[in-house]
Image: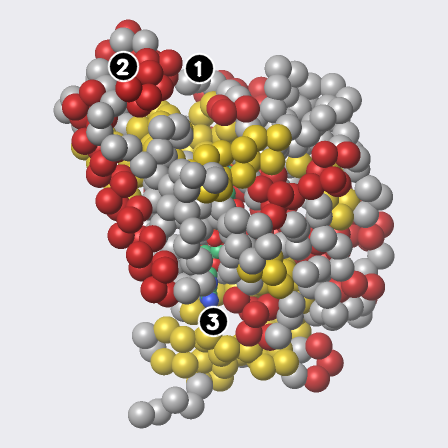
Amino acid sequence: MNLKPQLLPDQDILVIGAGSAGCLAAMAARESSSYSVLLVERYGFPGGTSTQMLDTFYGFFTPGESSKKIVAGLADRVVNKLHESGDIFLRPNTYGAGTGVNYNPERLKYVWDQLLEAAQVQVMLHTTLIDVMPLSEGRFEAILWNKSGLFSVTAKRVIDASGDADFCHLAGFGYEIAGEKEPAQSMTTTFRMANVDLEKFEKAGGKKRLQELMNATAIPLPRREGSAHEMNIPKCISTVAVKVPHKNALKNAELNEAEKEGRRQAFVFEEFFRKEVPGYEQSKIIGLSTQIGVRETRRVYGNHRLTREECLAAEIPEDSILLCGAPIEDHRAGADGESETHWEYIPKGGIYGVPYGTIVPQKAESLWVVGRCFSATHDAHASCRSMAQTMSMGQAAGLAAQISLDRGFSASEIPIHLLQERLAEVGAILTRPDQEAKTNRDDWAKNLRKS
Ligand SMILES: Cc1cc2nc3c(=O)[nH]c(=O)nc-3n(C[C@H](O)[C@H](O)[C@H](O)COP(=O)(O)OP(=O)(O)OC[C@H]3O[C@@H](n4cnc5c(N)ncnc54)[C@H](O)[C@@H]3O)c2cc1C
């Protein structure tokens, strides 16, 4: 057996994980720079959760009647590209999370490909990070595996966007595992149904009637709430209703069980929809999420840890790198073991700023951590994990890595004004918008739907 890794060319910036955070980190790292950027992804397509299981970006807009656009920059490029082919529509205020930008997830896989290629990011798909060796001067050697064998790559700067903080874990940085101190958020297998007669569904009472039927049915539904919303494709519905609590996605045996339970629940819902919901009689499940959706696992200890109190204080600290207005949306198991969702809204205009230190692991010199494994408590994470925010974290880390290489600063030494200037150049919003923001929304809103 030959386990000697093949050497890949040394990289300026290595990004692990091509989810919404990792794709944006890689794009931002290449933005107006000549640094080499390698993006490593274990699946065969980019996007992570955005393409594996979802179809709606939340977090671009604040909830409420006078909704404001609070995220912009490279994330707008993603939506604009989807808009070019008519693959988005806006979904106002679903479940109080703010206007959602609904997209066709299959098109989004292709859009991520196009945007990464245009940015000249080198992408290695079907490739998994399996080990890390810290080297001198803050550099790292990463060991990758794919069907062609083992590979070794050294990088001057690394951005961990693996969702599970795999790089930080393998490199020995500290983190909390969801479920250790507070109940971890449940996992969810999403599913899509085709051939739904939406006109008939609406005539029969729409979502209100659906909720009544869910409450009354004799079919043992695992959960009696959740989102079943219209997709970008006619007569198709996307559903976030399954809930699998009390499982740790970092433990293989538990993740196996969760996958099977998620599929079982999906088909219980199918039976209910087909038998009892007007308009769904001829419908069928046409797709389950690529894997069960994992909301949280490792949350890295950073130079700053975002807390529930900070979210609810609705302040924008001077070292902010992005804004968030999403409520704390905690999908947890209730006292009786049943899954339930807790909502808590951000007061005072509903916006808070996220400090730079939340994406810098403690003691890191040349490493950032972005997306759902950034530094936050359980509650704060439950607010700041929508994809507009994870994309914004990626954007900030990619630009921070550039500045760090340009000027020789370590991750924690970067003067915040330099990063904020670069963020402003790419169009990020870092101050409270004082009136209803029109940018993009007017354009995207041509595709506004009521559901
Ligand atoms: C069920 C569910 C419903 C949600 N609903 C919404 C919603 O409607 N709207 C919204 O905005 N947000 C929603 N969220 C939250 C949001 O989707 C996530 O917080 C966000 O997508 C996380 O992005 P990420 O890039 O940090 O991680 P991920 O999307 O998980 O991306 C991580 C990437 O890293 C790759 N990876 C992992 N380990 C390795 C490794 N060792 N080597 C190589 N690659 C690796 C993965 O394959 C993946 O592509 C939902 C989350 C879940 C789970």
Q: Under 8 Å from ligand 1: the CB of mark 3?
A: yes
Disc 1 + disc 3, Cβ < 8 Å: no
Q: Which residue is mark 1?
A: 450
Q: Nearer the viewer, residue 305 or 244?
A: 244
**What residue is at 22 percent from the left and 16 percent from the top?**
278
Are there few (<14), some (14-19), or many (20+) residues within 10 Å of tag 2?
Answer: some
| Above or below for 179 versus 438 | below
**What residue is at 82 percent from the left and 52 percent from the top?**
416
x%, y% of residue 243? 38, 41
Amino acid at pointer 1: Lys
Looking at the image, residue 287 sits to the left or right of residue 223; the answer is: left
Are there few (<14), some (14-19), or many (20+) residues within 10 Å of tag 1?
Answer: few
Q: Nearer the viewer, mark 3 or mark 2?
A: 2
**What residue is at 36 percent from the left and 58 percent from the top?**
255
| Above or below for 389 versus 203 | below
**What residue is at 58 percent from the left and 20 percent from the top?**
442
Q: Which residue is mark 3?
A: 129
Quadrant position of residue 119: bottom right
x%, y% of residue 224? 36, 28
- Mark nearer the N terminus (3 vs 2): 3
User: Which numbered circle lies on residue 201?
Assistant: 2
Confirm whether residue 120 shows in the render.
Answer: no
x%, y% of residue 227? 40, 29
**Alpha carbon of mark 1 to alpha carbon of mark 2: how far?**
14 Å
Amino acid at pointer 2: Phe
